[in-house]
Each structure stands twice: as structure tokens, then as C-alpha cells.
Image (cartoon, grey):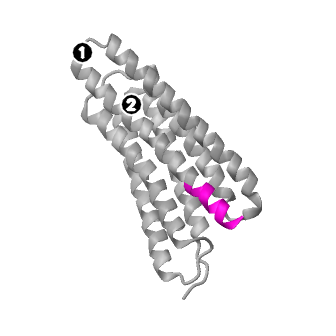
Amino acid sequence: MPTEGKFFDLFNQHADLCVKGSKEMVGLMTNFDDLEIRVHAIEGIEKQADVVTYAAIDLLHKTFITPIDRDDIHKLITRMDDILDLLEDAAQTISLYDIREITPEAKRLAELCLGCALKVKEAVALLHNMDNSRQILAICEEIDRLESDADHVMRAAMSKLFRDEPDVRNLIKLKAIYEILETVTDRCEDVANIIEGIIVENA
């Protein structure tokens, strides 16, 4: 039975894909002209991430001694996968709901998703060495702060939507988009919490 496995390589591959998917989402929110191309790109990135997730879980079953707790490996890779599942969900929802115009608030939430994904990538890249624990914990705090910013943007966006949007159908559509994007930042915070737990157990 293998004793280590390339878990950290797989974490890094997945984190790269989370950043790619988030960048596509910001691009989608910035320019609706290439909506279907962006949606297709995000779907493709999500499928690549699924392959990485399955590889990590398969490796977990084949590895006798893991570098960190088995349960933590499973939780970390599946929570990271949730990030891209939600980004795909957001892209498909925008396409299916035939949204013609995006709000500044939705774009801001997409930017916060990207900010969180970039920080997840930074934290994951340092995880192979517990000497990086202080730096990793500082990055996790930044993810928490970005998630808190997303909460504030979400509340303000909902308030504005219910106050100013005259079209009920459009209100329902935008509300759904806001909620999915804010949940992306929640999943990034979940990843940060798992990483913090790994640091506490191993540092």
C-alpha cells in the first residue's frame, strides 16, 4: 500500500480550477456578449475538477498512511468541489433564466468569489509544510473577511432588489443568482475552516 500519495498535488490542481472557474464567472458578469461561451467554459472546468476530486478520493482508498487525517482529506477535496458545483449552478441559472442585464451587486459578488478562490489557492499551496502554519492561518482569516464582505453585499443587494425592482419575475431571478454566489463564498469559508482544523491538529 502507498504511504503518502500525491494529495497536495491534487489539492493544488483543484484550487487552480476553482480560480479559473471564478475568473470565468467575473468575465461572464462583465460582458454578457459571450454568455454561452463562458457558461460552457465553466461547465468544462467543473468537469475537470470532478476528475481531480475522484482521483483524490480513489487515492485515499489506496493509501495506507496519509500525510494528514483521512477525514480531513475527504472533507477538504469535497468542499473545494462544492465551490465549482455552485459556480456552474450560477452560470447555468443565468443562462436558463434568460437574464439580460446584470447588476453591479451581482458583479461584486462574483469578484468576491474570485477573491476567496485566490486565497483558497494560496492556503492550499502552503499546506504541504506545517512550518507555514502562521501564514496559512492569516490567509484563512482573509477568506473569513471576504465571506463577511459578501454577506454585507448580499444583504444590501436584497434590500435594493425588494425596494426598487418593479418586475417580480426579475426579482426572483436576481435573488436566486445573489444567493448562489454568496453561497460560493460560504463554501470557501468552509474550506478555510477545514484548513484551520488541519493546522491545529498537525502544527
Q: Is residue 59 left or right of residue 174?
A: right
SS for tag 2? helix
Identify which residue is drawn at 65% across, 50% down: 122
Give x and y (percent) for residue 91: 36, 39
The answer to whether residue 103 is visible is: no
Q: Is residue 150 visible?
A: yes
Give the numbered dot on residue 78. none
Quarter in which the N terminus is drawn: bottom right
**Amino acid carrying mark 2 in the image:** Tyr
Q: Crowding at label 1, few (<14), some or many (≥20) Cα neighbours within 10 Å?
A: few
Q: Secondary structure at mark 1?
A: loop
Q: Amino acid at mark 1?
A: Asp
Q: Is residue 201 magenta?
A: yes
Which residue was labeled with disc 2? 178
- Residues in magenta, as a range: 194-203
Query: Residue at the right extreme?
Result: 131
Quarter of the rendering containing residue 142: top right
Q: CA distance from mark 1 to mark 2?
A: 16 Å
Q: Which mark is residue 167?
A: 1
Q: Estimate how packed mark 2 is, as few (under 14), some (14 to 19) or many (20 or more) residues with alpha carbons within 10 Å.
A: many
Residue 146, position as x, y percentages in the image: 58, 36
Query: Where does residue 145 sit, x and y in percent of width and height?
Result: 60, 36
